[in-house]
Amino acid sequence: MKRLLHAMLLGAAAAVALAVGAAAQVDYPAVLPGVQVRLPADHGSHPGFRTEWWYVTGWLDADDGSTLGFQVTFFRTRPDIPQGNPSAFAPRQLVIAHVALSDPSHGGLRHDQRIARASHGLAGAEPADTDVWIGDWRLHREGDRYLARLDASGFGLDLVLERTQPPMLNGEGGFSRKGRLPSSASYYYSVPQLRVSGTVRRDGSSLRVRGTAWLDHEWSTALLEREAGGWDWIGINLDDGSALMAFRMRDREGGKLWAAATLRRPGADPVHFAPEDVDFLAGRRWTSPHTGIEYPVAFQVRAGAVTVDLEPLMDDQESDSRLTTGAVYWEGAVQALQSGTPVGKGYLELTGYGAPLALPGSGP
């Protein structure tokens, strides 16, 4: 109830701010080809852009023998409100956080969410380096490691994620096309093969855990074309140390609108794949008992000459984030197989299956 009231108050604040600054126009920077992601400078937030996120997903082995998946996501969004708006209620930046634990022993996904204005120290996203928070939920970078601490409803995460490989730039130096229009693009890099240690709290008990994770950092102004309905995305840590990122943008009839992939072998430069070299072939489907939405939870994914089959840790990994982002999506731990043999672990994200996904700034 408190979260619902909070969301309503934020909506009212946004309405007031829009009324005050309706005559002004917000200018957002464009994502441009030829502009490369530069690290470490780009680890921090980019507050001029409309949308940004830091996405961490991974597999954990607990000291009680159980296998878990986890997701930690922080979003920063700049609303269509002029930054010089004089209203004290104007939400010049919003921060949203999602946390989830894929726990087969629980029989479903444990998840929680928050939203807050970036003001008065209650929430923020620092430009100097990765440091995003809402209250006591926080993800921040210290040198070659990330620290994630989130105490959620009924569960919690306190994790250290250590870098074992350099970041991987997706697309052309981090310029990642998402459609046929050059404006449909983002700046995008990944940090795969993170080594994870820490504790997970669930049902009042604390478990020591170890595992592997994947981090994505992406920022943009216009991500989706008008024809786009949603996307399918994977980030897979392969057992030989390789990393595979692939996505398919779907049109509103479910066909492929755009696709891309990045594959990096240990010690080698990344190889990038064009739309014609990337395929997502849907397999077994699952219908959510919570929303009635049907998702393909098993896939065969091809990137060039590499093909992997994906099977979920469990089917029920649907997140209902309508109180924060307005979306319902499937985000789940999956195992990668080749000819039936496990070759890696990662995460699969499915958006736009219940209704076409709408992001701020979508469309030409």
Image (cartoon, rainbow, N blue to C red):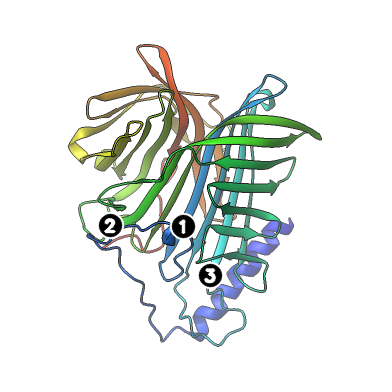
Tag 2 residue? 184
Please tell me which of labels 1 and 3 falls first in the chain. 1
Q: Is residue 177 left or right of residue 358?
A: left
Q: Are marks 1 and 3 in contact (CB under 8 Å)?
A: no
Kind of residue at disc 3: Gln
63 versus 122 height, above or below: above
Please tell me which of labels 3 and 2 falls first in the chain. 3
Picture quarter containing residue 261?
top left
Q: Are marks 3 and 2 in contact (CB under 8 Å)?
A: no
- Distance, label 2 to label 1, CA atoms, is 22 Å
Locate the N terminus by quadrant.
bottom right
For residue 43, the mark is 1
x and y, in percent, of residue 82 in the image: 45, 81
Tag 3 residue? 93
222 versus 91 height, above or below: above
Instruction: Identify which residue is drawn at 71% across, 30% down.
Output: 208
Instruction: Identify which residue is drawn at 37% across, 30% down.
Output: 242
180 versus 32 height, above or below: above
221 versus 80 height, above or below: above
Please tell me which of labels 2 and 1 falls first in the chain. 1
Q: Is residue 100 left or right of residue 136?
A: left
Q: Is residue 31 left or right of residue 14?
A: left
Q: Are marks 2 and 1 in contact (CB under 8 Å)?
A: no
- Distance, label 1 to label 3, CA atoms, is 18 Å
Instruction: Identify which residue is drawn at 54% across, 52% down.
Output: 143
Q: Nearest to the eye among marks 1 and 3: give it.
A: 1
Task: Find numbered disc 1 in the image and state the secondary structure of the residue it sits on.
Answer: helix
x and y, in percent, of residue 8 in the image: 64, 65
Task: Find numbered disc 2 in the image and state the secondary structure of the residue it sits on.
Answer: loop
Kind of residue at disc 1: His
Q: Nearer the viewer, residue 95 or 353?
A: 95
